[in-house]
Image (cartoon, helix red, strand yellow):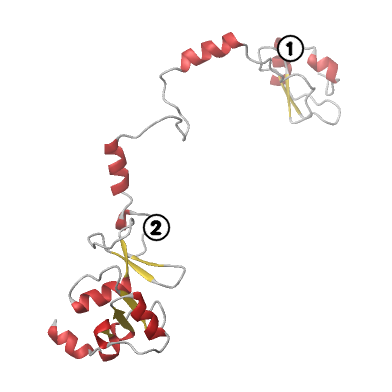
Amino acid sequence: MLDFLQLDDIMNLSPEKADFLCQYGPLVCAKNLTVFSGEHRTGAFLFGGNMPSGIYQRAPMTDEQKRKLSIAHKGKPNSGHFKKGMKHSDEDKLRMSLTRRGSDNANWKGGTAKHKDGYVFIYLPGHPRRDRRNYVLEHRVVVERIIGRVLDTKEKVHHLGKRDDNRPNMLMAFINQAAHNRFERDCEVNPKEIIYDGRKYDRKNHAESE
């Protein structure tokens, strides 16, 4: 058997001869070809080397071929991840929404989240001032639990320290933004404008009252 064949000789082999030769040893041609196989019904294929141009070119589909292909696939489910035009039912939307809430969410972090401005949010689905994600500012909830009611939207909470320090003794609450601004500017504030003053908070007395 020949150990080396020229490219023209290999390409002109019949499928039967190519299969026979491949059963008894690989054909090496020049420097670019490594393994030769004749399993394709139309002739020999070359693997591992630079293939002659034009072998894999396919004629574009005609309009008739496209029409027949469209009819053959009509009504069949899309196997891809994106299903164009597919709409979920209201029941499916509700089910998907419920599986992504609270502790069922993959990004669940114990029910707390910190805003880029430094404020801390806590997960409270039943709170009347919750956002669309069911989160509420923690400093407002702390004051509300002490005064025994929900704060109005115009009532403002002030931090005596850092924005993420929501201890009762580090918070104050005012009846509106104007009173809050005057306090921050060290201006006089009417005691009636102060809803809650954390500077007077007594942890021991508050625990006993609870």
The first of marks 2 and 1 along the sequence is 1
Q: What's the CA distance linking mark 2 and mark 1?
A: 62 Å
- Image location (x, y in percent) of residue 177: 35, 75
Q: Residue furthest left?
A: 209
Between residue 75 and residue 145, name the one nearer to us: 145
Instruction: State the mark number for residue 64.
Output: none
The residue under label 1 is which amino acid type? Lys
| Helix, strand or loop status at disc 1 | helix
Between residue 43 and residue 22, name the one nearer to us: 43
Report the residue at 74% width, 31% height from top: 48
Give the residue at mark 1. 17
Tell me where residue 196 sits by quadrant: bottom left
- Image location (x, y in percent) of residue 25: 74, 24
Instruction: State the mark number for residue 107.
Output: 2
Q: Quadrant of the N terminus?
A: top right
Seen in the picture, residue 31 relative to 138 is either above or below; the reply is: above
Q: Residues within 10 Å of mark 1 (few under 14, many from 20)?
A: some
Report the residue at 28% width, 48% height from top: 98
Report the residue at 53% width, 12% height from top: 67
Report the residue at 40% width, 30% height from top: 86
Seen in the picture, residue 197 relative to 136 is either above or below; the reply is: below
The residue under label 2 is which amino acid type? Asn
Tell me where residue 141 sits by quadrant: bottom left
- Image location (x, y in percent) of residue 30: 86, 27
Q: How many marks?
A: 2
Tell me where residue 119 sits by quadrant: bottom left
Mark 2–mark 1 CB contact (< 8 Å): no
Relative to 67, is 190 on the left or the right? Answer: left
Residue 120 can be seen, yes or no: yes
Depth check, mark 2 against mark 1: the one in front is 2
Seen in the picture, residue 68 relative to 197 is either above or below; the reply is: above
